[in-house]
Amino acid sequence: MEEKSKPLTNNCSFAGINPIMVALPYPPLQVKEPNPSYAELLRIDYCGAVSELSAITQYINNENRLSYEKCPIAKTLLGIAMAEMMHLQKLGELICLLGGKLDFSAQHRDGRLHMWSPEYLTIPENTRKMLLADIEAEKAAIRQYQMHMKAIQDGYINAVLARIIKDEEYHIMLLQSLLQEISC
């Protein structure tokens, strides 16, 4: 008689998870006028190497790998990923208002368009390194947003980017807290 083994089950429930964001409203999504140059900068934030698309993909990958054994951390990562999805949506809307196009490519420093690639992700094997990679990615995003804000002379766009930065700073604080918890 064949012995039946109990199937493995992931009991981490993601019911009720909400985007993890600062409790402040976003400014209206509007631009002074169409501007293809600004749209190109925002496309980098949308789907470049350091981008909301990269952040979402990295967080979801880490959440999936942690959910079976580290459910509370996985839930936090999913909530952060959901906030990054909202950032992606807002950037996409701004790009369209500016007259840009959304095709998951962004102009690199060499002047050529490159399609988004999972090569942009950092996929470490242990929880500590995952959290450290996520923190570094958030810091890089903040630096890039700040650099783009200096180049963009549109107060409407910069207000949205400044609001996104507040979420990214909050994410860093949460990730650092998780890192301290697992180090104890």
Image (spheres, rainbow, N blue to C red):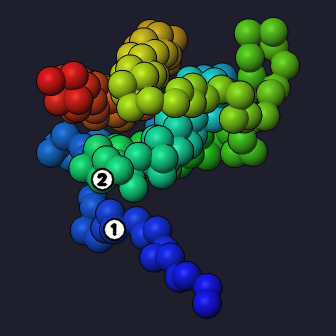
**Disc 1 crowd, CA 10 A, few/some/many (<14, 14-19, 20+):** few
- Tell me the quadrant of the picture where the N terminus can be found: bottom right
User: Are the two marked residues, 2 and 1, in contact with CB atoms closer than 8 angstroms?
Assistant: yes
Q: Secondary structure at mark 1?
A: loop
Q: Position of residue 121 (x, y in %)?
A: 60, 29
Q: Position of residue 83 (x, y in %)?
A: 36, 47
The type of residue carrying mark 2 is: Cys
Neighbor class of circle 2 (other Cα within 10 Å; few <14, some 14-19, many 20+) is: some
Residue 95 shows up from this direction: yes
Q: Residue at label 1? A: 11
**Along the polypeptide, which appears first: circle 2 or circle 1?**
1
> In terms of image quadrants, where is residue 23?
top left
Residue sitting farthest toward the bottom: 1
Residue 30 in view (yes/no): no
Q: Judge by depth and name the residue closer to the eye, 3 or 101.
A: 3
Q: Position of residue 54 (x, y in %)?
A: 57, 35
Task: State the residue at coordinates (65%, 26%).
Answer: 120
Q: Is residue 158 above or below residue 65?
A: above
Q: CA distance from mark 2 to mark 1?
A: 8 Å
Residue 104, given in percent of the width and then of the height, sits at 72, 41
Quarter of the figure that contains the C terminus: top left
Q: Residue at x 47, y 41 (%)?
A: 62
Q: Which mark is residue 31?
A: none
Q: Residue at x 25, y 68 (%)?
A: 16
Kind of element beneath mark 2: helix
Say which quarter of the image contains residue 167: top left
Front-most of residues 155 and 110: 110
Q: Amino acid at mark 1?
A: Asn
Q: In this figure, which residue is indicated by the disc labeled 2?
A: 71
Looking at the image, residue 107 sits to the left or right of residue 75; the answer is right
| Residue 51 in the image: above or below residue 139 | below
Above or below 144: residue 27: below
